[in-house]
Each structure stands twice: as C-alpha cells, then as structure tokens.
Image (spheres, rainbow, N blue to C red):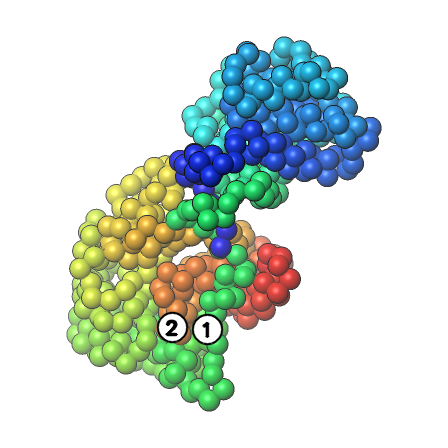
Amino acid sequence: MQPILTPSEAAALDGAVEARGISVSELMERAGWAIAMAAARVAGGRSGRRAVVVMGPGNNGGDGAVAARILSNWGMRVAAISMAPEAGDGPSAENLRRLATETAVPLPPYSPEHLARELDRADVTVDAIFGTGFHGEPAGRFAEAIERLSASDAPVVAADIPSGVNGATGAIAGVAVRATRTVCLGALKPGVVLPPGSFAAGEVEVADIGLPSDLVRSELHLVEASDVVALLPHRAPDTHKRATGVVLIVGGSRAMTGAVSLMAEAAAAVGAGLVIVATPESAMPVVQGNVTEAVFLPLPETKEGTVAEEALGALLEKAADADAAAIGPGMTTEAETQTVVRSFAENTRKPFVLDADGLNAFAGRSTALAERKAPAVLTPHLGEFARLSGLGAEEIAAGRIAAVRELARATNGVVLLKGSRTVIASPGGPARVNPTGTSSLATAGSGDVLTGMTAGFTARGLDPFDAAAVAAYLHGLAGSIAGASQGEGTTARDVVAAVPHAVRRAQAGAATGAEA
C-alpha cells in the first residue's frame, strides 16, 4: 500500500531525513530533477520547447527554481517567474540565486501581463507556487497567477500538489491550479487523493527523491491491486461449502425485496460457500425467485411487513452458525424492526456489516455500538454518516479522513464512508483510501452489493478492516467494468456480474505492476 503523508507527517519526515544526514538542498535538487523530467515528458521533448516555471515562497518555489535551471540546461527555453523574489537565506533562496547566475534565464518581477505573454507561447508550465502545507484561500497576485495558469491552453505540471488545494483535505476554498500532471515528491499527499483536489491533480505520479524508506511512516495508505490480490482468500483443494464462508444476510421488507437479494448475490460472487437469507415471510417468495443458490429463513413480521421482535431469537441462533452477517438494507425505520436491529448488533458474537436502515437504527446513538460483542463494519453513505456522527455534510467533506477516524474510534468499529473517494478507518487509527470507482456506481442497490461483498470476504476469513478495503476496491473496479459495457444504464446486478472480472483484472494488474 502506498503511504499518504499528511502535511504534518511530511514536515516530521523532513526533520528525520535531515537528522539522517540528507540535507534539504539535496532533496530539493532531486525534487527539481523529477519535476523537470515530468515537464519535458509533458512538453513532448526538450530541445526547442518552451517552459514557464512559476515559483512561490518556501521549498515548493525552491523545487521550481531547480526545475527551471535543469530545463534550461537541457536546452529548453525557460521563462521563470518568481512570486516572492525577495532575497533571503535557505535552500530556496540559494536555488533562486543559482538560477539567476548559472543560466541565461531572466527573472523579471511578476506582472500579470508578462505571465500571460509567456503562457501564450508555452509548451508546458510548472506550478511551484504553493506546497502541501497550504490551506485557506489564495489571494492577491497568487490567486491571479493561479487563475491564469488554469485558463492557459498549455499543460501544467504541479510540484507536489496543485496550488490552491488544501494539502491535508483536498478542499479548494477559492481558486486552484488545474494540473495535467502532479508530481508527488517522495509520497502521495491527501490533497491529491481526496476530491476535489484529486480532480485538480490530473495524472499523479510519485517521484522517488531518495527518502529512506524506514522513515516514511504514515497511518494512511492508498489501496493498490497488489494489496488486494495478496489479501484474497484461496480455497483448499479438499474444501467444502461451510469451510469457504457462511454468510447470514438479514434485510428486506414486504415493500423492499431488492436489497436483500443483491446482498446475497454479492456475498456469493466473492466466494462465500453458503449464503443464508433471512427476510420477512411475505417478502420471501420474491427473494427466493431472485436468489436461487441461497437457503432461507422466513422471519415473523409486523403488520407493515417488516421484521418483528419475535425474529430476534432465530436470527441470533442462525448467526451463531455463520461466519459473518450483514444486516440493514431494506428493513425500513419501523420502530419495532429497529429494536431488532439494535438487539442483534449488540448481542451477536459473529462479525457483521451494518448498512442502510441498520445504520439508521443507531442514528443519534452511535456510541451504543461500542458496547457490542463482535467486530463490526459500518458502511454509511454521506447522509447516514451525518446521522450517525452528528456532523454536517460540509464538515465531513472538509475533513473526510479525520471524520471517519473519529467515528471508528467512537464506535470501536471499522467505518467505510462510501463516495469518491471511499475512506476506510479502523478503530485504532490506521485508514485507507480506495482509488477505484466510477459514476456507474451511482445507481440503486450499488451500496447493497458492497455490503454483501464485505460480509462475504469477512466470512471467508479476512479481518474486517481488510475485508472492507478489498471489497471496496473490487466493487469500484466492477463498477468500472460494468459501466464500460452498459454505460449510464448500469444496474447493481450488472455490478455483481462484473465482480469475477474485477478479481481477474486486479490479479493481472498485480502481476504486471500496473494498477487495475
């Protein structure tokens, strides 16, 4: 898994690297080289090409100054524009002086007219205005330069992060550079992984600038195909259905039979050997017609056709014979049914996935989940997360990773916040970001498929944190595969059908070292 360094972790790393005997100047030289290499590739070559390098204050500007010097030495015609040309000390100021004394690159004072003229004839531009420590809203000449870079037809290579993007959250408070390519220096940063910053970053590459691997420490990682393949369970040659994962699926109501069917199909699609479907008696004939491979547990129901309190004993007894359970989708918010959900979650001793109406049963009382007896994975979308956490949608979006970590801590469970990008956090602090997914997944039942997949992988023996990460990656990949053939008409059942193809694509990606 690729580490994702927060600004504070990156700052701590800089100090640790310097203590190891590697100077900031040395790292800056390597960073500038990586940025120059990317700029030359984007420009389509070196000789005769024009590059505009816009440099801000701090180390990011110093990286840009090194890139400008190297590009000039390679034969490119370089226009260097310093947004903070005041003399000073330190590696950035030294590299600005080197650019002025060791090359013929002019360093005129910034003016919007000069920048506009240079951008009009550029083959590539380098954005080295702000680094990953930036937060807030660009103002004055910085905002003006960012707007001109984004409006230009020339492709933009961003140094570490597009200027204007909050390095810790990916938020964009004002204007931000829209990069063609972003060169992350040493490691990924949250701002280029999380939207909307990820949308501004274009193609992202991580440049090796010689950071000692033992010093690159983070509790946040990006899931990759190789990680998923390494975690996938494998069946022994002499196995049988109960040894390959028994899943109890609890859900549905008289008016909502689709969700429980999709969960059951998805659990089977990831290799669970036996799926048991528990749903109200009146919903059972429809579900049985949809899912032919499962076994069934008809449940006593309320007059509204939802799960009644008398069902609790049978559910707990059946869960005891399963390896994992999933509960919630399609169950409604009927009071008696929600009591069943809460009692099941609090008393089952088998790991379970809680979704949809299962989560709604704990709205405003999420800390009660911490008192349960078994591991749990909570899989909310943004609205359900808001009801559980008490946070507003804007608060969650502004600090997605921190919010998911806090809910995981408060509930002592794994929390998977669905969306672009899906974030998964364990109660101890480690978190993962899933890079796969597509707008094809914006369809009814897609979340139910993810719930079934997560329960299936948990039943097959994966730790719930790993099960959630593997399911999210393959679910996103299956959505892309289904969307490629079905377009905007993709349904949740199409996604289920694409799951085996997603597994094979992940395996192929891991084998070649290319992301699926």
Q: Which residue is mark 2?
A: 461
Residue found 62% across the figure and 17% down from its top: 97
Displayed quadrant of residue 510: bottom right
Which residue lies most toward the right here?
48
Expressed as whole percent of the image width and height from the top left, the position of residue 205 reads 60, 44
The CA distance from mark 2 to mark 1 is 7 Å
Q: Earlier in the sequence, mark 2 or mark 1?
A: 1
Given residues 265 and 376, the one toward you in this image is: 376
Q: Image check: 158 left or right of 154? A: left
Residue found 32% across the figure and 71% down from its top: 325
Label 2: element kind: loop
Which residue lies most toward the bottom here?
238
From the viewer's perspective, is residue 412 above or below residue 204?
Answer: below
Expressed as whole percent of the image width and height from the top left, the position of residue 381 reads 38, 51
From the viewer's perspective, is residue 332 above or below residue 184?
Answer: below
Displayed quadrant of residue 342: bottom left
Q: Quadrant of the C terminus?
A: bottom right
Q: Image check: 76 left or right of 493? A: right
Residue type highlighted by circle 2: Gly
Q: Which mark is residue 430?
A: none
Q: Is residue 359 visible?
A: no
Given residues 196 and 59, the one toward you in this image is: 59
Residue found 70% across the figure and 29% down from its top: 70
From the viewer's perspective, is residue 484 above or below residue 70?
Answer: below
Q: Which residue is mark 1?
A: 233
Disc 2 packing (10 Å; few <14; some 14–19; many ≥20): some
